[in-house]
Image: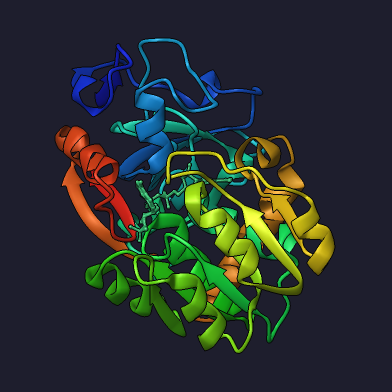
Amino acid sequence: MRAIQISELSGPDALTLVELPEPEASHFLTPGQGVAIDVRAAAVSFPDVLQSRGLYQFKPELPFVPGAEVAGEVVEASDGSGFRPGDRVAALTMLGGMSERAVAPAHLTYRLPDELDFAQGAALVLNYHTAYFALRLRGRVKEGEQVLVHGAAGGVGTATLQVARALGARTVAVVSTEEKERVAREAGADEVVRADEGWKDRVLEVSGGGVDVVIDPVGGDRFIDSLRSLREDGRLVVVGFTGGSIPEVKVNRLLLRNIEVVGAGWGAYAMSKPDLCRELGAEIERMIAAGHVRPIVGARFPLERAADAMRLIDGRGALGKVVLEV
Ligand SMILES: NC(=O)c1ccc[n+]([C@@H]2O[C@H](COP(=O)([O-])OP(=O)(O)OC[C@H]3O[C@@H](n4cnc5c(N)ncnc54)[C@H](OP(=O)(O)O)[C@@H]3O)[C@@H](O)[C@H]2O)c1
């Protein structure tokens, strides 16, 4: 099978297309729990770019096949996995997704509803599960609340806008360009504010005095103004640091206005909790059926152009999700 391989940690330039033996379901994790998938679409995400430089928390041994999530058709499923050959699925593979054949654990494999194509399926697990986890389980977002989303035209951002709307929240998106403003609106943002134009004051204005929750995949110098954008009892949910630096907070800011800063690290946390994975999958499935969740795929590349796909994300150019068609 053809696959993308990383054999040195020098970023997107190091990606090469190679021939490798096909993995089998039985080779994966706990025996009886693997699902082998004929990959039709593989996602490329910000963490893949970090991982190509050895900067992500999950550091596989070299050489490795990158790619955390895929969509495709089941070719082989362990007994008891609940899947059969031919099933359309979306799955979190963690590694090995940028390939013609990948293997995922059964509890992170989900039926792909007919409403979504394979490219949308490849955009479904990482970002939408993170969005639900961050909004509902960590941020405790309730119907009628207002949610500010940073990096709102990116993969996590567009997913968060759609899931927040499905939860009955009103959303304010922060984005850096006109094109990203269009994408945030397509993802359902009620208000869009530009990152370079005194965004905090605009947020206070359009939200009528502050939002209830901030979902922050950007960090860096946005952080203090994010705290100032919250109402009393507000929650800032830390999701990532695309802005490059990890912010610090003087906790008197939290005390004075009764606000919280909470972390949302979905991946490693959820992986060892099959029941949570199934619960999140069921919530997202309901949101797809209700028409709220429709992953936005902003760029599609053939497998052999995986390096270009990563460069697009690296250059802050991704709109929605970037996908490799296999
Ligand atoms: N906590 C979790 O469980 C979890 C799960 C998945 C992903 N993540 C993290 O979430 C973050 C976002 O991932 P993603 O896939 O949504 O990435 P993405 O599609 O590339 O979007 C990231 C957004 O960040 C904004 N940004 C601000 N400053 C930036 C900079 N200097 N360079 C690049 N982007 C910048 C950009 O929006 P503007 O240009 O509009 O500002 C961009 O659209 C990453 O840090 C990722 O590791 C966390």
Quadrant of the rendered structure where residue 88 is?
bottom left
Write the residue at 46% across / 85% down.
190
Query: Where is residue 311 shown, x and y percent of the image?
Result: 22, 38
Res. 300 in view: yes
Lateral position of residue 53 relative to residue 190, left or right: left
Coloration mode: rainbow
Res. 67 in view: no
Give the number of marks: 0
* Position of 272 relative to 316 (above/below): above
Q: Quadrant of the N terminus?
A: top left
Q: Nearer the viewer, residue 22 or 326?
A: 326
* Position of 147 relative to 38 (above/below): below
Lateral position of residue 138 relative to residue 319, left or right: right
Write the residue at 37% across / 17% down.
64
Lateral position of residue 151 relative to residue 254, left or right: left
Query: Where is residue 317 shown, x and y percent of the image?
Result: 24, 52
Write the residue at 42% across / 20% down.
54
Q: Nearer the viewer, residue 48 or 237?
A: 237
* Position of 300 relative to 44 (above/below): below
Write the residue at 28% across / 18% down.
10
Lateral position of residue 233 relative to residue 89, left or right: right
Q: Nearer the viewer, residue 37 or 211?
A: 211
Quadrant of the rendered structure where residue 78 is?
top right
Query: Where is residue 165 shown, x and y percent of the image?
Result: 55, 79
Q: Quadrant of the C terminus?
A: top left
Query: Where is residue 280 shown, x and y percent of the image?
Result: 66, 57
